[in-house]
Image (cartoon, coloured by chain):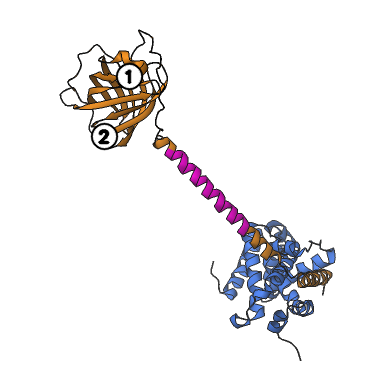
Amino acid sequence: MQRTDEELLAAHGSLEFAIFYRRYAPEVLRYFARRVRDPEAAADLTAETFAAAVVARRRFRADRGSAAGWLYGIAGHKLADFQRRGYLEDRARRELGIVRRALSDEDATYIAALGDEVVTDMLSVLPGEQRDAVHAHVIAERSYEELADRAGVSESAMRQRVSRGLKTLRDRMGTGR
Amino acid sequence: MIDFLEQLERDLVEAVDRRQSAPAPRRRRLRLRVDLVAAAAAVAFAVALVLLLGSQREKEEPVTHPTTPTVTNPAPVPKGTPLQIRGVVHTRGPDRWEGRVPGPDGSPGDLTLAGPVELGQRPCCEDFHQANTHVLQFRWVSPRGAISGCIVNTIYRRPHARFVWDGPGHVTDATGAFARYRGREIGIGGVSNVRLTSRALVSLRHSNRPPGRC
């Protein structure tokens, strides 16, 4: 019988925490990758979040909410600190004696792809020309002039294509200009 | 899982095991240290407060001097030694001022002035007709003798935030080394700050002015 998240955190053992970690680590990494768009920062935020969870897990109270909500609460605080300060503190990792490890190229590529997934999903709703134009200009940071030359249209037409694509995305997300 | 997540899992598991084997968490030790620091700071603050209050009291209230011992058969001060008693006195009661000040021979003695001194706040500036005049009894005592007398003292409110003490008097009694000053004319001059009326720099010295009626 599978143990619940709350039982795993309450057990305080390393095996139980490892199970809890395996359940949520990929999700948390994706959560950060989609928000910071930087593989190194996403990895650091993930490591600091779980280190903080280890430090604070004795204070977790199941009657106050789910373990997943508690973990994402920590993640939200770490993300807010990172966005406010422009850098990430490693206080919890230092307390646990965990050293920062450099990302391999493969892992960095994988984490970057996690961040791109959401954009790819969003762009899929656009017509082909608009999707290519928005991706090339917003994601790949190509200039209007270069895109217009490659597509064989005027620069103003390319601007209009990107603008219409972004407007469609805003409308779908329910956010005005 | 990718390598990064697997490595992070190993690091976290080791950290959990380390914390499990160490019963006293660092946070508790840190809290103990904070308590010790707070206690030390409180003691230091209390000592500093006592020292500060002590020094303030020394500044504001002159020390009460013990009874001045008497020298038997002291040599008289040389002839021509000017009669002068000059120094700082402080209020020691409603109509009483005291201070340890040097006398005619330069030796320290205890000066006491008794009588009303009007230093109430009032606008500047006062001339003779507006000023407050009262009789002061004075006594200066040193191991070699004593000088006492009376003065008709007038207080003037003058510019530069001052009260000026001024008036004539005479020596009614002098003993020991200072016996030669008995019956001499004497005058008082002094100054108090209007914002610190518990203190005065006074000078009692020989005066050629007609002695006041006291």
Q: Is residue B36 magenta?
A: yes
Which residue: 61% across, 59% down? B35
- Disc on the earlier residue, 2 or 1: 2
Give the chain ID for the orange colour. B
- The x, y position of residue B39, in whole percent, is 58, 56
Disc 2 versus disc 1: nearer the observer: 1
Horizontal placement of A19 versus B156: left or right?
right
Q: Determine which residue is flagged by label 1.
A: B175
A171 and B78: which is toward the camera: B78
Disc 2 element: loop
A12 and A74: which is toward the camera: A12
Per the rendering, the mark at residue A116 is none
Near mark 2 (Cα within 10 A), the count class, few <14, some 14-19 or many ≥20, is few
Give the chain ID for the blue colour. A
Can you say which quadrant of the picture contains the C terminus of chain A?
A: bottom right
Please indicate, yes or no, whether residue B208 appears anywhere in the rendered image: yes
Near mark 1 (Cα within 10 A), the count class, few <14, some 14-19 or many ≥20, is some
- Spatial CA distance of label 2 from label 1 is 25 Å
* Residue B124, quarter of picture: top left
- The x, y position of residue B91, in whole percent, is 32, 34
- Per the picture, the main secondary structure of the magenta-coloured stretch is helix
Q: Which residues are magenta?
A: B35-57
Horizontal placement of B13 versus A4: left or right?
right
Q: Are marks 2 and 1 in contact (CB under 8 Å)?
A: no
Q: Is residue A139 magenta?
A: no
Q: Determine which residue is flagged by label 2.
A: B95
Disc 1 element: loop
